Structure formats: structure tokens, C-alpha cells
Amino acid sequence: MPEGDAVHRTARRLHDAFAGAQLTHTDFRVPALATADLTGRCVVAVIARGKHILTRIDDGHTVHSHLRMDGAWQVLAPLAASRLTKPHEIRAVLATADVVAVGRRVHDVAIVRTTDEDTLVGHLGPDLLGSDWDEEEAVRRLRAAPDVAIGEALLDQRNLAGLGTIYRAETLYVSGVHPWTPVGDVPRLDELVRRAQRLMAAGRDAGRPPTSYVYARAPRPCTRCGTPVRKAMQGAPPYDRITYWCPHCQPERSAAP
Ligand SMILES: [Zn+2]
């Protein structure tokens, strides 16, 4: 599952390859865009907003895509792109004379007016890796629902955008906070949010999460205290996602599952 760090890396790679370049071919393999053609247009910029990727075109439109659980954008040389396998996975193709971007299993492919991007991403909280990052605003949004478990609240992209299950687990571990602690009972919520931002920024720059204390480690022993790491689903189905924690390093403050 790509989290904000991977989405931002993808957007940066697309931006470096496409910004300022003229599109020589486009292909959108979703029914609503069957006749869309951006050939001859120039790409202005590619940016990430939370887990959304926005490709801005010089005609005032934006191509939107979302990686969700399994999507990916490949950036290929034209020769490699001519030998693509698994064509049924391809949802979008953007090509210049020098480079081809292939969106595999990307979701919610849409073209909107750039001035209407907010209809797709306006609900998102501050982006941990965005130029709009605003720690105080993220804390304010989290605190607005003090009874929600912090593990659930951190994945709600309306509070802050970009976190997924890896950074949630690692942030809560390094903060010593049990995932089911109500937001209102989390001590130093501002520091917890700051740690999440720093972990994710480090992960973006390194190409992988900088820590692996608990994520996917259950039932192996905690590296700090030796207690077996636990895991459980958190959140209301079908949006429940797996959480990992050390019951010793992240003591329970209230009702756990
Ligand atoms: Zn521990």
C-alpha cells in the first residue's frame, strides 16, 4: 500500500520527466475518458496531494489518479514502453518524445479543470509532505473528535493526509502511545504529529520507511523490551486496517479491543 512518501516520490519522478514537455500521445483506458486526448498539450507540473497524484496540463486541466492499494506509475523509455506486458492493467498512458508514463492499476482516473481540483482533494487535511503542511491545523482537526481512537484518526485523510498503516504503527510506537487511546487522552499530540511528519519525510528521501519497530513484526519480540508485538484490525469494516503495537512500550490507557 503506497503511503504519502511513495506517492510523493512517484509525483517527483513524473514531474522531473514531464514538466515543461509536450505530450505526443495519451491514452486513457477508463470509459469516461475514452475520447480524451491531450496530444500536443504541455505538462505544467505533477504534484502529490496526500495519496492523490495531480498532473497539471497547460490547457487548464488536471489529470487525477490515486494509487490506492496496488497502483503504480512507471516511467519508461519509449522502447521499453513498446514491449509492455499485462496491458489489461494499464489505465493511463502519457508520452513525450523522450519518455512514457504508464499508470498500472491506478484508480479514480479523471480529468477536471485545474481550478476544480478541490472537488477531488479539497476534503484532505494538511499534507505531511506538502508545501501546505500545517502541524497546528492537523492537531486541531484531530482534536475535533477526541473520542476517536488515535490509530483510526491518524488514517483519516481529512485530519492529515498521507499516512498509511506502516507510518501509523511506527509513529505510535516511537511515541509510546497505544493505538486505541482516545485522541483526547494522547499526551503531547503535537509531538506525535511532528514525529509522523519527520518519519515520513525521512522515508520519502530514503526510499523506504526509516524504522521498522513493530510494523509487520507480530508476534516477534519487541526490539526494545522483548515483549511479543501484537496485531489487530482497527476501524469499522470495510475500512478496518491492520495495526501493530508493543503492549509494554505502548501501554493501554483505556479500553482496547
Ligand atoms: Zn516493547
Image: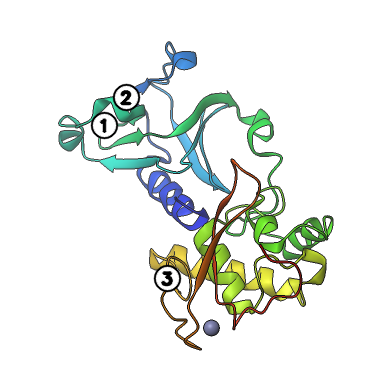
Q: In which quarter of the view is residue 149 placed?
A: bottom right
**8, above or below 112, in the image:** below
Amino acid type, residue under disc 2 in the picture: Thr
Mark 2 CB in 8 Å range of ligand 1? Answer: no
Give the number of marks: 3
Whole-angstrom CA distance, mark 3 to mark 2, is: 47 Å
Q: Locate residue 117, reporting x and y percent.
A: 64, 33
Q: Residue 10 or 44: which is nearer the viewer?
A: 10
Q: Give the mark nearest the N terminus, 1 or 2.
A: 2
Whole-angstrom CA distance, mark 1 to mark 3, is: 45 Å
Q: Please name the residue that numbered disc 3 is placed on.
A: 217
Q: Locate residue 70, reporting x and y percent.
A: 40, 42
Residue positioned 80% across, 71% down in the render: 185
Are discs 1 and 2 less than 8 Å apart at CB?
yes
Residue count near mark 2 (Cα–Cα under 10 Å), binned few <14, some 14–19, many ≥20: some
Q: Give the mark nearest the N terminus, 1 or 3.
A: 1
Q: In which quarter of the view is residue 19 placed?
A: top left
Amino acid type, residue under disc 1 in the picture: Ala
**118, above or below 6, in the image:** above
Residue count near mark 1 (Cα–Cα under 10 Å), binned few <14, some 14–19, many ≥20: few
Residue positioned 66% across, 72% down in the render: 178
**57, above or below 249, in the image:** above
Are discs 1 and 3 less than 8 Å apart at CB?
no
Residue positioned 47% across, 67% down in the render: 215
Residue 97 - label: 1
Q: Locate residue 89, reporting x and y percent.
A: 31, 29
Q: Give the mark nearest the N terminus, 3 or 2.
A: 2
Q: Residue 207 or 15: which is nearer the viewer?
A: 207
Amino acid type, residue under disc 3 in the picture: Arg
Q: Please name the residue that numbered disc 2 is placed on.
A: 24
